[in-house]
Image (cartoon, rainbow, N blue to C red):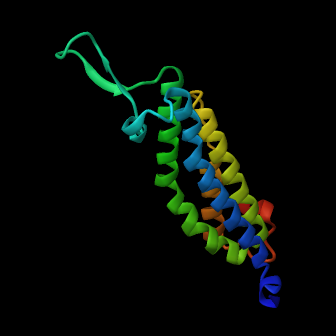
Amino acid sequence: MSSVAINDLHYYAFGAFVMARLTGFVNMYPMLWKACIMSSKAGNLRSNMYFYRQQGSNDEDGKIVLETKGDVGAYNRANRSMHHFSENVPGMLLCFPLAAYVFPFPSTVLMSVYAIGRVMHQTGYTKVQACLCDSVSCMLLLFAIICRGTEDTPWALVLL
């Protein structure tokens, strides 16, 4: 335990906890919208991650697109946000341990900003809005690793 305290690894552990809770939220949030559009007795229909509709009046000019209106559209967007998370989280998972090793507290703060940004993205995207907070915090972590700020470099300058 003394090595944890000496190396400030409790911050890293908290950042890992934040990421674990974020992952749970991102994966479960679409279920709130699923409950709005189908009952638990819907059977195999519940396995659909997206719902589509035909755009156009006939087969020749009709295109199959994601439904964007109402609760079905919100469900589709919540699932798209979940997929955005799975596409973008590897960079954060790679950068966080490296940055946390050098800058434990600031990295944990940025992990928390990332988590808040992802929640804002997913909840906002269901309302056709998005937030870039998650991308910005990930870029700041990468920048911090690249700059390798020293004890003489204030964190404010590293983040600029």
Instruction: Name which residue lies at 60% across and 30% down.
Output: 129
Instruction: Name which residue lies at 58% across and 46% down.
Output: 28
Report which quarter residue 1 is drawn in: bottom right
- Looking at the rendered image, the quarter that the C terminus falls into is bottom right
Instruction: Say which of 155 and 10 sits in front.
Output: 10
Determine if residue 160 is in view.
no
Residue 64 vs 122, above or below: the answer is: above
Q: Position of residue 66 (x, y in %)?
A: 38, 28
Instruction: Say which of 153 and 45 sits in front.
Output: 45
Instruction: Say which of 159 and 115 sits in front.
Output: 115
Instruction: Name which residue lies at 72% across and 72% down.
Output: 13
Q: Position of residue 91 (x, y in %)?
A: 52, 62
Residue 111 vs 59, above or below: the answer is: below
Q: Is residue 151 left or right of residue 115?
A: right
Residue reaching furthest to the front: 41
Q: Position of residue 98 (x, y in %)?
A: 62, 74
Q: How many marks?
A: 0
Report which quarter residue 143 is drawn in: bottom right
Determine if residue 146 is in view.
yes
Residue 117 vs 51, above or below: the answer is: below
Residue reaching furthest to the left: 60
Q: Is residue 21 left or right of residue 57?
A: right
Q: Position of residue 147 (x, y in %)?
A: 65, 69
Residue reaching furthest to the top: 57
Instruction: Say which of 80 and 51 sits in front.
Output: 51
Instruction: Name which residue lies at 71% across and 77% down.
Output: 102
